[in-house]
Amino acid sequence: MKKPALNIWKKSGIVLSYSYKNISVLLSAGLFVCSMTIVQAWAISSILDEGFNPSNAKGLFICFIEIFIVFSILKGIGIFLSNYFESNAALKLKEAERKNIISRFFRIFPGSTETELISLLNNQFESLETYYGEYLPSVYLSIFSPLIFLIAIFISDIYSGIILLVTAPLIPLFMFLIGNKAKSMTDKQWHILGRLSYYFLDTLQGITTLKVFGRSKDRIKKISEITEEFRISTIKILRIAFVSSLTIELVSTLSIAIAAVSIGIRLLNGKIEYFNAIFILILAPEFYYPLRKLAAKFHAGLEGKIIKEKIHILLKNDMSDDERSNYESFPGLINRVEQIFPLKLENLDFSYEKNKKIIKNFSLEVTERQTIGIKGKSGSGKSTLINLITGLLEPESGNILFNARKLCKKELASIFGWVPQNPYIFNKSIKKNILIGREIATESQIEMALRISCLEEFVSSLHNGIETVVGERGMNLSAGQIQKIAIARAVIKDAPILILDEATSSIDILCEEELVFRLREYSKLKTVIFAAHRGGVFKNADKIVDLDNLIR
C-alpha cells in the first residue's frame, strides 16, 4: 500500500506533492551534511588543540587531519546529492503543474486571456522551479538542521547554546515583518507584467490595423508607460530584498559576535576549555546558515506562492474531486462503436458571461451512423455546442454521456474527427499538416483524404506537390484551401464521429456541392454532426437542430 502524500498545495486540487519518500531523501541528505559538518568542526578543534600541546603524540595529530579530510570529502558528496535531489524534484513538480494547466487549457481559456495563460506557462512557471528546488527544501532544513547543531553546542557549552537559542528566532521574525510588505508588492509586479504582456501581444496581432488607422504611436506610448511602471515596481522589490538581506545578515553576525565575545571572556578566565571554544566558534555560523539561506530564498518563495495562487484561481471552477470520480476511464482509447453510442446530451447549460446563457437546458440524442445538422444565426451557439460535445468546453450543468458514461479527454480525442470553424495551419508541408490527424498513414490513405477533401487537383498543380510548405497560419493558401486541408486532416483520422463546424463556409458553392457529396459517401458508416449557415447542406441530415428557436 502506498504511503499518503504530503500535499504542498491542497487547495488547488492538483495531485502534486512532495511524497514522504522525497522528503525523507532531502532531509536525509541535508542532515548527513550537518553531521559531516559537526565531525569536521570536531576534527579541526582537535587538530588545533593537539597542535598547541607539544606533549601530545604526533600520530594522533595526523589522525585528526586524516579524519578531517575524509569527512570533508563525504560532506562534499552529501552536498552534491542534496542539490541533485532538490533540482530533480523541483523540475518534475514544475513540469507536472505545467502539464496540469495544459490538460485543462480549454476549460480555463474562456475565463482567462490568451496572454495571461502564455505568460503563466512560460516566464512565470520558472519561479516554481526556484520555489520547489530551493525555497521549500530550505524551509525543511531550517527547522531540523539548527536543532542538530544546537544539540552539539549544548553538549559542549550550555551558555553558548542559550545565546544561540535566544537570538535564532529573530531571523524568522524579521522575515515575517518584511514578507508582508514584499508579498503585496510582488503581487502587484506580476499584475503589471500581465498587463504588459497583454498590450504587447495585442499590439503585435493588430499592428497592421494600427498602422492603417494611424494609431501605432498611441499604442507605443501606452506600452512605454506600463514598462516604466513595471521598472519602478521591480526596483522597489529589489530595494526591499537588499534591505532585508542586509538586516538578516546583520542579525546573524551580531548573534555570532555575542557568542564569540562570551566565549573569549570565559576562555581568558579559564571557565571553558580551548577545544570547546574552537568547536563552538566553528559551529556558530553553521547554526545560522540554514536560516540565512531560507532568508535569501524568501523572495523567490513569495513569487512561487503568488504563482501558485494564480493557478489556483484559474482552476477554482474546475471539477471537484467528487465530480472527477464520476468520470470512468476505459483501458486504452475508444476504438469500438458500441462503447460510444448512444451519445446523449442531457439538460446542458453554458454561458461565457453571467446572466447570458448561450446554451440553456439543451438535450439531444445521437445514434450510430446518424447525420445531425445544427443551424442558426451567428452567435446562436453552434460552435459552442460543438465544443461542448468534443470536450473543449465543460457545461455549467447537465451531462454528456457516451453509452451512459463520461469519457476523459484522451478518450474524447480518439473518437472525433474535427474540422473547426477557423482551422489552424502550421508552417509545415501540406502532408505534415494532414498527418496531424494521424501520425502514421499509408500513401493510399493520404490519397483518399486528398480525394475526399477535393485537394488532389490543387496539390498536383504545385511544384513540390504535397510536400509544399504552406507558411505561417497557411499564409500561402486561400481560406477555402485551408478548410480543405482541415477536412483532409479529419478524414485521415478515420474516427467514428465526424464533426464539421461550418467546414465549407469559405468554399464556393459549386465546389461545396462536390465536397459535400464526397463527404456523404465517405461518412455513410460514420456519425456526422455538422453546423452550417447554408440551407442546402441540410437536405441529407437525419435530424436538424435549429438553435434560433431554442428558448433561452
Image (cartoon, rainbow, N blue to C red):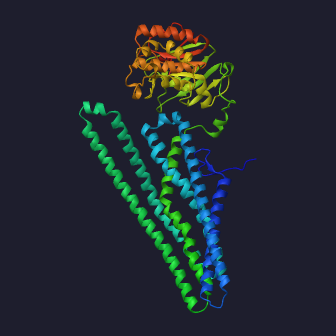
Is residue 508 visible in the rendered image? The answer is yes
> Please, which residue is most extreme toward the right here?
1
| 410 relative to 468 in the view: left or right | right
Q: Is residue 551 above or below residue 223?
A: above
Residue at image point 60% right, 44% down: 14
Query: x and y percent of residue 286 in the render?
Result: 57, 72
Q: Nearer the viewer, residue 57 or 421?
A: 57
**Quarter-of-image position of residue 478:** top left
Q: Nearer the viewer, residue 440 or 132?
A: 440
Residue at image point 52% right, 26% down: 436
| 181 relative to 497 in the view: left or right | left
Query: x and y percent of residue 288 in the render?
Result: 55, 71
| 229 relative to 168 in the view: left or right | left
Is residue 305 visible in the rendered image? The answer is no
User: Disc count in the image?
Assistant: 0
Residue at image point 54% right, 14% down: 448
Query: x and y percent of residue 230 in the render?
Result: 36, 51
Residue at image point 37% right, 59% down: 236
| 444 relative to 515 in the view: left or right | right
> Please, which residue is most extreme toward the bottom here?
269
